[in-house]
Image: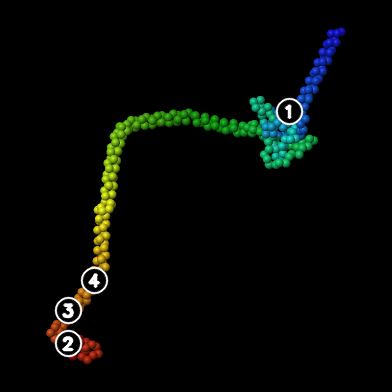
Amino acid sequence: MENKAHAMAAGAFVLVVTALLVLLAVWLTRDNTQRDLYDMSTSETVSGLQPQAAVRFRGVPVGKIELIGFDEKVKGNVLIRVSIDRGAPVTKSTFATVASQGVTGLGFIQLDDDGKSAERLAVNDDDPPRIPLKPGGLDKLLKQSEVIFNQVEEASTRLNKLLSDENQQAITAAVKQLGNAAGSMDRVAKGLEPTVASLPALSRDTTATLKSVKTAADDISTTATRLNEKGGPLDKLSEGGTALAAGVETFSAATLPKLGEVADETARAMRQMRRTVSAVDDNPQSLIFGNGPPVPGPGEPGFSASGVKK
């Protein structure tokens, strides 16, 4: 009897301890956070999402997924209902995407806001408001996969055409031509070796010539300096030119006017002499008897049209 009493006491103690542990666990895991319900509807695939998966706003945990089912309002769409902390900044411009977590690939809901509206989304647990669910990166990749596959197939076809037998023969011929061209260049290089070897001597001759030209230029510069210096040939030539210009100016100012007057007097004397010679030639007797009376003009007594005195 005593053993049975001890066994019952031990069993009761275990039950009490177990009950206390359960109560402690419930107390430690209790969640007093106030959350609001929101719905998301999408026609995309939501593989990887599970109920109780996390809901994050720009990486910060703000809630969890309550259920995943079919949308009764939009036929064929998947409905995701989430509970989000009331303190989360859910506005009319907030949108959601399906993201995957790390290496495990477990899905979760990622919330974000484009900032177009600051008005909070009105909550109603009886008819939860809807947050737009946009395609995530994986969905976009799946949509583009067909285009990528087509491009890969086209690239593979072009590569096969490029590596056809005809193109391979053409490439082989081109490589041979390149080899021949390289051999020709090698022969040309060998033919240029004597010319290249003579370049140092040519360079030395050119250097000597340049030195001679520089010496001649220095001599010309020295000569020009001597010609241009004070009292040099050019200076004396300039002084002689100045004196000559002064003499010409004096001659033009004093002598030329007098020569002009003498020329005028000489011209008048020549004209008078010409008239005298003409008169003597017309009437030679005038040298002995003089000129006589003048010949009568028209209308005067003794006038004659023949010029003979009556």
Q: Left or right of 32: which side holds 218?
A: left
Q: Residue at x 81, y 20 (%)?
A: 19
Observer-side mark, 2 or 4, equals 4
**Quadrant location of the N terminus in the rendered image:** top right
Q: Circle 1 — which element?
A: loop
Which residue in the structure is indicated by mark 4?
Answer: 258
Which residue in the structure is indicated by mark 3?
Answer: 277
Alpha-carbon span between mark 2 and mark 4: 40 Å
Alpha-carbon span between mark 3 and mark 4: 29 Å
Alpha-carbon span between mark 1 and mark 4: 136 Å
Whichever of labels 1 and 3 marks the residue nearer the N terminus, that label is 1
Q: Circle 4 — which element?
A: helix
Which residue in the structure is indicated by mark 1?
Answer: 52
Q: Circle 3 — which element?
A: helix
Alpha-carbon span between mark 1 and mark 3: 155 Å
**Residue type (three-letter) at the residue carrying disc 3:** Val
Q: Nearer the viewer, residue 219 or 69?
A: 219
Whichever of labels 1 and 4 marks the residue nearer the N terminus, that label is 1
**Residue type (three-letter) at the residue carrying disc 4:** Lys
- The reply to whether residue 278 is visible in this rendering is no
